[in-house]
């Protein structure tokens, strides 16, 4: 059973709220941490956001997100790299544990998946020097293969672990149950990730899933064996924050945020 002291709110769970509203709600509900998305951090301004978060005694499990390294030409990839450096700066400004990376899918009009994966490796490699100089770990998040074309062509934890082996210090993994729950040899790959685990994201997989992106379930409403998953994460040595991240256009986003958070806390304590 997960203790509330490890709960972190991924702000996409309460999509309509500003950063200020998210911070106030965390305080109100006794949630000790959050993982904000860049758009709401930028609206507040990264420095002001960092001040607001720390003054309210909250921790930051990550900044969502950097990445999108793939592009059809050099200029596009350079733009992505520049934007990622800015994301590293923002992650530092808000005191994030890591910058979460969603790496990007196929470039426009391309069918070259292996080429895209090479671009991702080179993109992360290019960002790593800068991230290391800022002491900001990069949390590579493998995404479910249904997103290989348009969001991320790193699709398994094994692939992410291989990239960590190749690129070394400063790169770790953010493990989201939604993306890898189906993966063969998952327990071994989680153990292999070990100290490289920088983030652990939870929600649930609904049957049926009605939207590829925006129909994530609340913990306990789907088919993921969250307690077993958590036991593997724990065995691998990760004892940090656990993020609840639920994109749910048809259900949870339509409910009042405070009601959602009450359910989040209850399910976190009983199902994770
Ligand atoms: Zn995630």
Image: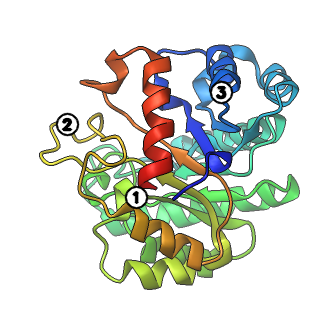
The residue that mark 3 highlights is 26
Q: Which mark is residue 177?
A: 1
The residue that mark 2 highlights is 211
Identified at 59% across, 78% down, the residue is 236
Category of crowding for the residue at label 3, using alpha-carbon neighbours closer than 10 angstroms: few (below 14), some (14–19), many (at least 20): many
Foreground: 239 or 270? 270
From the viewer's perspective, is 165 left or right of 13?
A: right
- How far apart in space, not on screen, are marks 1 and 3 (Cα)? 23 Å
Mark whose residue sits in front, 1 or 3: 3
Q: Position of residue 200 (x, y in %)?
A: 55, 57
Identified at 72% across, 41% down, the residue is 60
Identified at 63% across, 14% down, the residue is 21
Foreground: 123 or 157? 157
Q: Where is residue 14 in the image (x, y as percent from the top left)?
A: 48, 24
From the viewer's perspective, is 258 left or right of 78?
A: left
Identified at 37% across, 52% down, the residue is 105
SS at badge 1: helix
SS at badge 2: loop
């Amino acid at each position: 059973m997960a203790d509330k002291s490890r709960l972190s709110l991924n702000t996409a769970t309460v999509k309509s709220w500003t950063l200020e509203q998210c911070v106030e709600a965390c305080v109100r509900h006794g949630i000790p941490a959050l993982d904000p998305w860049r758009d709401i951090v930028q609206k507040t301004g990264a420095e002001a956001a960092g001040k607001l978060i720390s003054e309210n005694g909250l921790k930051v499990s990550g900044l969502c997100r950097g990445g999108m390294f793939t592009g059809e030409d050099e200029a596009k990839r350079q733009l992505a790299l520049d934007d990622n450096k800015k994301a590293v700066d923002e992650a530092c400004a808000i005191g994030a544990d890591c910058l979460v990376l969603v790496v990007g899918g196929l470039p426009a009009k391309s069918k070259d998946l292996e080429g895209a994966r090479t671009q991702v490796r080179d993109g992360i490699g290019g960002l790593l020097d800068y991230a290391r100089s800022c002491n900001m770990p990069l949390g590579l998040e493998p995404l479910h293969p249904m997103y290989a074309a348009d969001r991320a062509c790193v699709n398994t934890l094994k692939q992410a672990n291989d990239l960590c082996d190749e690129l070394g210090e400063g790169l770790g993994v953010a493990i989201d149950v939604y993306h890898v729950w189906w993966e063969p040899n998952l327990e071994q790959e989680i153990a292999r990730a070990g100290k490289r685990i920088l983030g652990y994201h939870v929600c649930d997989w609904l049957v049926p899933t009605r939207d590829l992106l925006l129909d994530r379930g609340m913990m306990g409403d789907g088919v993921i064996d969250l307690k077993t998953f958590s036991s593997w994460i724990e065995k691998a040595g990760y004892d940090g924050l656990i993020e609840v991240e639920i994109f749910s256009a048809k259900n949870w986003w339509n409910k009042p945020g405070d009601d959602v958070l009450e359910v989040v806390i209850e399910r976190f304590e009983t199902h994770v």
